[in-house]
Image (cartoon, rainbow, N blue to C red):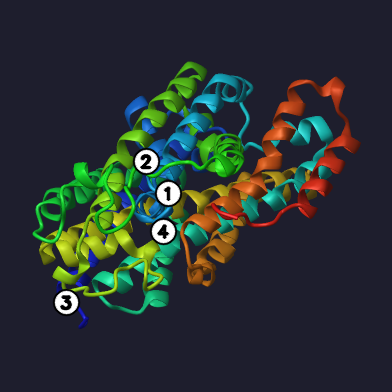
Amino acid sequence: MAFSVGGIIAIVFFYLIILVIGIWAARRTRSVGAEAVDRSEAIMVGGRDIGMLVGVFTMTATWVGGGYINGTAEAVYLTGSGLAWAQAPFGYACSLIIGGMFFAKPMRSRGYVTMLDPFQQQYGRRMGGLLFLPAVFGEMFWSGAILSALGTTLSVVVDIGVNAAVIISACIAVFYTLIGGLYSVAYTDVVQLICIFLGLWLTIPFAMTNVAVVDITKTAREKVFQPPWLGGIAEKDISMWLDNYLLLMLGGIPWQVYFQRVLSASSATYARLLSYLAAIGCIIMAIPCVLIGAVGASTDWNLTSYGYPGPEARNKSEMILPIVMQNLCPDFVAYFGLGAVSAAVMSSADSSILSASSMFARNIYQVTFRQQILIDDRHILQTQNGIILSSPTTFCPVFSKTTSTLTPLHFLLKINFVLVLRSLFDLCPKLCSIHSLSLCTTVHLFSMIPISRKP
């Protein structure tokens, strides 16, 4: 496909909107920081006064990233997979519900700043600092998954350099996160989630009414071009299916991006309610992704500009969402959908950047290394800004070479699974010690192998 001027204009338009909102929100950070005793809290947790509406939007947008929407569509489209194996929406929703039931209220009530604070109190500052490593690696792999989604979309719809587009996107997210902290991230999340919702739903009617697409209610249960997109679970795969769900449900809890929203809530009750409402939001945002995947499975690609063979035969299953946009929808719809995917990526990338920098500034620099020195709050902020600029998260185009958006998601959740065990241990400190914590970490590291959906 030729270089698309219209696609570039659409991307620039969406990015300018996001950048302007981020800069505008940064002004509120400065005003709150000027009145706050500890300005670092204005950066890290928004002064703990994020309202209900903005809180629900930002928590939902954090999970509904590029990997989420592309991965859900991919799972529904894949032969032998289908909706039965599109586990991320319900898995993440369950993780938010569990987090709200057991963790949100006590974490907010005790006034923590990051999710590592209780571990440093329980096990000491050094061990708490060590736990920073799996947490920050999880953020890196998460960023790799979502930036991969952006790269695949851009390569299909507008045919531009993937690496350049990904790096520019990361730099924009770094810029407004750097100047505005959580306020910029939260308010841009509101705009981004609206863009995602409108962009994906705008695609649906055009894609479903294309002449090359068979009625998805028919292909849901009958084999037309491939097995039914509802899918199924073979008896031999039940254990794998359950394992994946447990991985999503428990591995989706111990994330700083989640607890950053919890800790920014104006009250402990709000913190719990945000989790429940965001769980509903994740399910709602998955619906258009499922429909796009179903459309892909119901399309006679011989009748489209894509031609024969279809995306799966070309090992392009991870690109099914942008391929549907490009080949089954008018150009203006495809470009708007591209903006939606870009917004999804930005909404999660900025959260990861702020998350990693907050943990480093507080749990590594302030608590671990400078605990015996009277620290100027501005010094902490400078350290945080420095780690934002040099964060490995901005170099995640390296991970965009992965062949599937599902594999890195499972891998990063595998890394963080051990943290939820630590959290459960922390509820019963008499049953564990620093030795059991170290043993848990060691055993996990030796078993940390990326898993796939099928053996």
Marks 3/4: CA–CA distance: 23 Å
Three-letter code for the amino acid on which mark 2 is drawn: Arg
**Label annotation for residue 180:** 1
Q: Nearer the viewer, mark 2 or mark 3?
A: 3
Three-letter code for the amino acid on which mark 4 is drawn: Ala
- Of callouts 2 and 1, which one flags the residue occurring earlier in the amino acid sequence? 2
Please name the residue that numbered disc 3 is placed on. Answer: 5
Give percent across and percent down for residue 151.
38, 68
Q: Nearer the viewer, mark 2 or mark 4?
A: 4
Marks 2/1: CA–CA distance: 8 Å
Q: Is residue 136 above or below residue 287?
A: below
Seen at 39% across and 56% down, the residue is 79
Q: Is residue 18 visible?
A: yes
Three-letter code for the amino acid on which mark 3 is drawn: Val
Cβ atoms under marks 2 and 1 closer than 8 Å: yes
Three-letter code for the amino acid on which mark 1 is drawn: Gly
Q: Is residue 381 visible?
A: no
Give percent across and percent down for residue 52.
36, 25
Q: Which image quarter is the C terminus in?
A: bottom right
| Residue at the extreme right of the image, as rendered | 435
